[in-house]
Amino acid sequence: MPSVYNWQLGRPMQYPYEQAAPKEQFAFVININRCIGCQTCTMACKSTWTFAKGQEHMWWTNVETKPYGGYPHHWDVRILDLLEQANPGAQRWTGKPGDDPHRPYGQFSGKTVFEAPQRVAQGSQPNLVLGYLPTDEEWNAPNRFEDHPPTGPSKPMDFGAGADLSGDKKHETWFYYLARLCNHCSYPACLAACPRNAIYKRPEDGIVLIDQQECRGYRKCVEACPYKKSMYRGTTRTSEKCIACYPRVEGNDPECGGAPMETRCMAACIGQVRMQGLVKVNPDATWIEDRHNPLYFLVHVAKVALPLYPQFGTEPNGYYIPPRWVPTKFLEQMFGPGVQTAVERYRNPDRELLAVLQLFRRSNQIIARYEIQEGRKVYQTSVNGRKFEMYDDTIIAYNRLGKEMFRTKVEEPVHVRPAAHANSI
Ligand code: SF4
Ligand code: SF4
Ligand code: SF4
C-alpha cells in the first residue's frame, strides 16, 4: 500500500492511493466553549439539502451531547473499540507536542483505520478500511442523550476503550455539545473504500463528493467513514453526504460579488461558534504558512483548535476549540495530545488570539486574511495566577478578492439608553 504523510499523526501512514493534495483545502473551526446546542446549524442544512423523500434520517450536520450522545448511536465508541481490538493496548501517542508543523502533536504510534484492517481479518480478504455498518436503529433519534451529564446521582457509565476518567475531577457533572459535519478529510476513508471510484476529492478546494451517477449503493463508504458522515438513501439506492455547500464556496452567490461564501451550517450559527475557510496546502498536505489566515492562526500559531479524533488517520479538516470544563483525559482521547495547551491558551488568551476570536460570524463571506490595529489598554486582571491584559484592538477582515469585509473591536460597545426612553422597547 502506498505511503502518505499525515501531519496530524506526525508520521507517514499507509493509504490505498498515492499522495495527492488539492490547491486549497476546505477547513473549519468550531468553538465548543460557546456552542449552545440550539441546532440552528442542523436545521439550516436539513432545510437546504436533505428535506426530500428517503432523506428523513439524514442529518449531514448534527449536534450531539457528549459524552453519551452520538449520531449514529455511539459511533465513536464503536470505532475506538474496533481499533483497540485490532491493536490491543498500543493505540498510543508518543513524543511531545511542539512547534514543528510536520508533527505539532507529537507522533501517533498506534494503528489508523487504514493500517488496522490487516490485523482483524483472519484468512479472509481484508477490507481496505476498518469500519462497521450501523444498523437502522442506530440512525434513529439523532439527538439521543441530549443534555445528559455523565455523573451525579446515578452511577457513571462506561465510556468505552481507553477513556479512563478516574482521578480527573475537574467537574463532577459535565457535558458539551459537539457539532459535526463531514470533515472533507485529506485522506478520506469513504473514498478509499469505494469499489466504484465514485467518490472524489476536488483538486481546487479539497471538498469530497459522491458522484451520484457512479454510485451503486454498496455502502462501503458508510462502513468505512469513521465519523459516519456518509449516509445511504433507500429511494435512490445511492449514498449521499455533505457537499460543503460548494456553490457558495465557489463564490457563485450574487450576494458576495464573486468572493467565496461560508456554508449554510456555518452562516446560520447564532452562537457565533463556527468559522470556515480555505487553507493553502503543500504537496504532502501540510499547511503552507499563511500567518494572517484566521484558520492557520488558530490551528498552527495559537494552537487552540484541534482535529477531531486525529488517530483515525483520515486527517480531518474540522478543528475544535476544546471545552475548558471537561476532564482532560476524555478530551485527549477525542482531540489528541494538544488539549492541555489549547485549553490553557483559550482560558488566558494573548492579545492576538483575543482579537482573532472576534472574527467568528461577523460576515457570511470567507475570511482570507486579517489585520490588527492596536488600541488602548482597557482592563487588567489575573487568570489562574497569570496576568491578563485586554486591549481594545480593532480587527479588520478581508475576503479572497482583497476587499475589506468588516472591522470589529475587542471591547463591545456600551449603549446607554437615554432617560427619556428608559421604559420603551
Ligand atoms: S468525514 Fe467521512 S465522509 Fe467525510 S471525507 Fe472524511 S471519511 Fe469521507
Ligand atoms: S457544509 Fe452545507 S452540506 Fe455540509 S453540513 Fe453544512 S450546510 Fe450541510
Ligand atoms: S447553530 Fe451554532 S450554537 Fe447552535 S448548535 Fe449549531 S454550532 Fe452550536
Image (cartoon, rainbow, N blue to C red):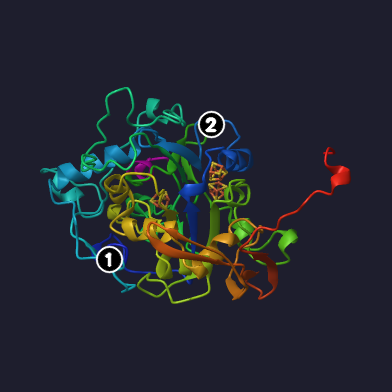
Label 1 CA crowd tier, 10 Å (few <14, some 14–19, many 20+): some
The residues colored magenta run 217-223
Write down the quadrant of residue 19 in the picture: bottom left
Towards the viewer: 219 or 77:
77
Indicate whether 156 appears above or below 231.
above
Residue 416 screen position, x and y as percent? 77, 51
Q: Which residue does the image show at 11% across and 43% down from the upper left?
A: 122
The residue that disc 2 covers is 54
Q: Is mark 2 within 8 Å of ligand 2?
A: no
Pick the front one: 413 or 385: 385
Residue 125 image offset from top left, x and y in percent: 18, 46
Residue 353, horizontal then vertical, whole percent: 50, 66
Residue 332 at x, y percent in the picture: 29, 51
Mark 1 and mark 2 in contact (Cβ < 8 Å)? no
Left or right: 78 as drawn, with respect to 191: left
**Residue carrying label 1:** 97
The C terminus - image quarter: top right
- Helix, strand or loop at mark 2: loop
Q: Is any part of residue 204 visible from this angle?
A: no
Q: Where 280 sits versus 162, above or below?
A: below
In this picture, residue 67 sits left or right of residue 252: left
Q: Amino acid at mark 2?
A: Gly
Q: Nearer the viewer, residue 406 or 367?
A: 406
* Residue at (48, 76) in percent of width and height: 290
358 versus 329 height, above or below: below
